[in-house]
Amino acid sequence: MQATHSTLRRRFGLALLSGAALLMTSGASFADTAVRTIKIATSAESKPLSWGAIGVEPQGYEPDVLKAINAKLPQYKFQMVGAADIAQETGLVTGKYDMATGGFYTNPARSKQFLIPATPMGASLMKIYSHKGSNINGMKDLVGKNIVPVTAGGGVYKFVNQWQQDNTGYKIDIKASSAGIPYPDRLKEVQSGKYDALILPSNLGEQTVIDNQKLDIVASEPVSINNTYVLIHRSAENQALNDDINKVLIELKADGTLDKLAQKWFGEDVVKYMK
C-alpha cells in the first residue's frame, strides 16, 4: 500500500528525532571519555615558585607553566591543589595525584619510582646571600664564615656536603637544623649580622623580600644549577601523558613562554641555565 504524505512526514520526523537523540547520546559519551582530569599536587608555600592552600587556586611560576601546558593539551583537564612537600610525593606514589610539581630534582630513586618528562620545566639556581661589601662571591669565600643553618637532609645540605667532598682543601662550617625558620627571617639574620651568609635556591622569592624590606643584601652568581621537573605517577596509562607533556615543554621553551614566565615570577633569566 502506498504511504500517504502525512505518514511519510511522520516517519521522516521520527527518523530525525532518533538521529538527533543518537548524536546527543554519542556526543555526551565522547565528552565523558575524551577529556581526562589530571590531579596535580603543587607546592603550597614556596612563593613565587608555587603557593596556594587547599581550596585556593595555586599561583606562581609552576602553576602558570602547567596552565600553558594544559592550553596545548585539550585532551586533559589539569586540576591543581596545593600540598605540603612530604604529601606531594606520598600522594604521587599512592596514585592520589597523577602529577606533582615543587621544584623537584631528578635522582635515581625518583626516576625509578615516577615517570619524569625528559625536558625540565625550570631550573633551581643555588646562590649565596650576604651583606653588601662582604666580598662573598663563591663557595670558597665561605671558609671561616658563620653560615645560616640549613635544613637537615635538604637540598642545600646535600649540595654543601657534596661540594666539601669535591673540594677537600676548603673547610666550610655548615650546621644542620630542623627548626624550619622562614627564609625571610633568615635573610634578616644576615642583615642584622647574626650570620655572614645564607645559601638557598633563588626561586623562593628572596629578591622580592630584599627589595620590599630594603635589605643591604646581595646574591652571588649561581654556585649550583639543577633542572626542575614534573613528576608523574608511574602507570601504563600515564606514559602517554608523560610523552605529551615532554613534547609541549620543548615547545614552550622554544617559543619563549618559559622565559616570559620566569621573568614574571623570578625577575631573572632562569631558562638560559636549563641544561
Image (cartoon, rainbow, N blue to C red):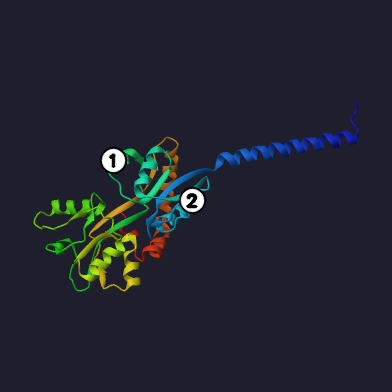
- What x and y, as percent, mark residue 267? 36, 66
Instruction: Examine the rendering and report whether any part of residue 260 can be seen.
Output: yes
> At numbered mark 1, what does the secondary structure look like: helix, strand or loop?
helix
Sequence-first disc among 1 and 2: 2
| Depicted 91 relative to depicted 70: above or below | above
Instruction: Examine the rendering and report whether any part of residue 117 can be seen.
Output: no
Question: In the image, is 252 to the left or to the right of 33?
Answer: left
Residue 77, which numbered label?
Answer: none
- Residue where numbered disc 2 is placed: 70
Which residue is more in the foreground, 181 or 6? 181
> At numbered mark 2, what does the secondary structure look like: helix, strand or loop?
helix
Q: Residue at x 49, y 48 (%)?
A: 78
Q: Residue at x 39, y 47 (%)?
A: 100
Which residue is more in the foreground, 67 or 46? 46
- Residue where numbered disc 1 is placed: 109
Which residue is more in the foreground, 252 or 105? 105
Q: Residue at x 89, y 30 (%)?
A: 3
The amino acid pointed to by label 2 is Asn
- Position of the N terminus by quadrant: top right
Residue 7: name its quadrant. top right
The amino acid pointed to by label 1 is Ala
Label 2 crowd bin: few (<14), some (14–19), many (20+), radius 10 Å: some
- What x and y, as percent, mark residue 240? 44, 40
| Depicted 275 relative to depicted 187: above or below | above
Residue 254: name its quadrant. bottom left
- Spatial CA distance of label 1 from label 2 is 28 Å
Viewer-side label of 1, 2: 1
